[in-house]
Image (spheres, coloured by chain):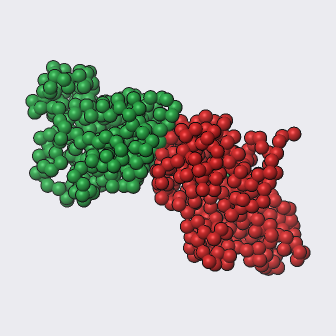
Amino acid sequence: MAETGSLNMIQALGNALDHYLERDETAVVLGEDVGGFGGVFRVTAGLQEKYGSDRVFDTPLAEAGIVGMAIGMGLGGLRPIVEIQFADFIFPAFDQIVNELAKYRYRSGGQYAPRVMIRTPYGGGIRGGHYHSQSPEAYFAHTPGLRVVVPSGPYEAKGLLLGALECADPVIFLEPKRIYRAAKGEIPLDYYTLPLERAQLVRKGEDITLVAWGAMLHTCQEAVALAEGEGYDVELIDLQSIVPYDLHTLVRSVTKTGRMVVVHEAPMTCGFGAELVAAVQAEAFDHLRAPLLRITGFDTPFPYSLEDHYLPSAERILRGLVETIEY
Amino acid sequence: MAGLPLFSILNEDGSCEEAYRGLLTDEEVRQALDAMILNRILDRRLLMLQRQGRLAFWMTSRGEEATILGSAASLLPDDPIFLSYRELGCLLWRRIPLPLIFNQLIGNSRDLCLGRQMPVHYCYKEWAIPSVSSPVGTQLPHACGFGYAAKMRGTGQVALAFCGEGTASEGDFHTALNFAGVFATPTIFVIRNNGYAISTPESSQTAAESLAIRAEGYGMPGFQVDGNDLLAVAKVLGEAVARARSGGGPTLVEAMTYRMGPHSTADDPSAYRSDDEAAEWNRLDPYERLKSHGIWRGVWSEEEEATTRATWDERVVSTLAECERHPPPRIESLFEGVLETVSPQLEAQRDAYLAAHRRRQQDEFEVP
């Protein structure tokens, strides 16, 4: 039997990077403070020592430069793995990501396809205010040519990161920092991958389908327990891959339950929940027994003092579940 | 005129100091003259084609050929050139077949990029020409990253990136040079200082005396060169390439030149600059200067020019006609290559569209 270890998400991600750097000698880790210090969250700790400062290195402080340089490295035959310190700081690199990285394969007719992975901590719940809390998945989901992946625990983080690193497409890998150091999971220490673009059925249920990703999955689990106490049987799905997304699993679930609630931290308007609601109603309209509901952050910038009100709570989710079931 | 050439090699009569004769071989001088002639034929004809509505867009490069060709001539064939957009001459120097160039401009089924980008957004991997994009300056950090990869993998390649003086105002210019300096990448940045960013004169881009002096702030050598003197460009670039290849890191070159034509077919330079100014630059025409040099060297003549022009004229017309006959790309290709495989979402969109398209076609052929 393969060896396992008790790792939190940060350790799981570091372990995945270690495996991949070992396996692929073209792999290079770059970003701000990722070298000697190991990144502000210490995901890359120890990697420079092991793989050298040509392969794991600090860059000048410029996100557009980091991503732009990584694209060139990809064109030159390397496999760059970028860390952007916080997802909130990714916007200076937005042009390089959406206009360059995302389009390179398409616009060159497949002649060039730089394989660039961008990892970045995202999401709220750490009292970080606007600039350390945002959930930008929808911006990237709207750009053809990118994959967007969000793990929800240590096991998923390692498997999805390695799956994404094996994939030939550019990936925006959003790491829910609120649960970086939350509960450890017993995970295989060997190399393993999880398939991209597949949602995970976390819990089977008959009454309603609840969909979330990242840290919100854990809040949803609390809500599911509360709902269970009130006699409701909730089916919980972890979307995992935002783009491309696993519509099939959602439709199969909603066909059974007739109801769906989508939960995310980002603002409601044009959030990724809007896409899921639109796609599911188009496929499962005849099976619906209630309007599909979104429970999300508000259409405000992410707040500091009142973040507990902004973030969907287990109680808010429970209310949405009950209202939808009793519609 | 302010900012005119600091470093030139060619004298007015086409002669040069004996020491500089070896910068280019006789054959390279002939190749550059040949490419310049073709470049000008294309400039004229494609501008016309755009006016006739047969081409969506064209960007002229008349006046800047010495900068462009002199840079290309200093590289080896597998050194990537990150084009800005105006450097048709690089394609001609690398002898990319004319049909491949026209297929890109037309966006037909034989375009290597499947008609996905508007004209002049070239990409030819086989000739080490990565893809061009419209937002200016984005290619500069790519050249730095490619240089890093070349250095790390020990390929010996040097990455060259072009931009205009307007682009030197972009953030990507700064980050690219800063990164290249920090990582000592084998990357060469060539600014084609052609006087205008569309209608905005150079004086509105920078308060500095030159752009080349910025190099010091990035920890690399910087040079200003007479961009209409192909030998001078080849000299400065040749040294920069040798330095980069031997581990000496990046170089910034500011080539002082002039855009004789409009920025693009959507532009009218008479609205923002005087004829006198253009006439003055005309005296420094890069083709005429290299032609005098070729004649002085005894490797070029009026007859040769006439024959070359006639040959290209004829080939351009016939090749264009042939390329215009190819159909547009397959409709299915619209949906391919976004990611490595077609996503389920896109697959659904494709199937629905193609089914509807086929129904429409059937309806058209049905006899009522």
Horizontally, residue B96 falls left or right of residue B227, namely right
Residue A275 lies, with reference to residue B105, above or below; the image says below
Residue B30 lies, with reference to residue B340, above or below; the image says above
Whole-percent x and y of residue A272? 64, 64
Q: Is residue B119 visible?
A: no
- Residue beneath the point at 16% across and 22% down: B18
Q: Nearer the viewer, residue A128 or B169?
A: A128
| Location of residue A279 (image quadrant) | bottom right
Colour of chain A as rendered: red
Whole-percent x and y of residue A108? 49, 42
| Location of residue A302 (image quadrant) | bottom right
Horizontally, residue A319 falls left or right of residue B229, namely right
Q: Nearer the viewer, residue B286 or B332?
A: B286
- Residue beneath the point at 86% across and 62% down: A204
- Residue beneath the point at 38% across and 34% down: B248
Colour of chain B as rendered: green
Quarter of the picture containing the C terminus of chain B is bottom right
Q: Nearer the viewer, residue A45 or B215?
A: A45
Residue B137 lies, with reference to residue B234, above or below; the image says below
Residue B295 lies, with reference to residue A152, above or below; the image says above
- Residue beneath the point at 16% across and 39% down: B285
Q: Nearer the viewer, residue B368 or A187?
A: A187
Q: Is residue A302 visible?
A: yes
Horizontally, residue A314 falls left or right of residue B15, namely right
Whole-percent x and y of residue B349? 62, 55
Question: How many numbered dots are placed on residues in this image?
Answer: 0
Whole-percent x and y of residue A31? 54, 50
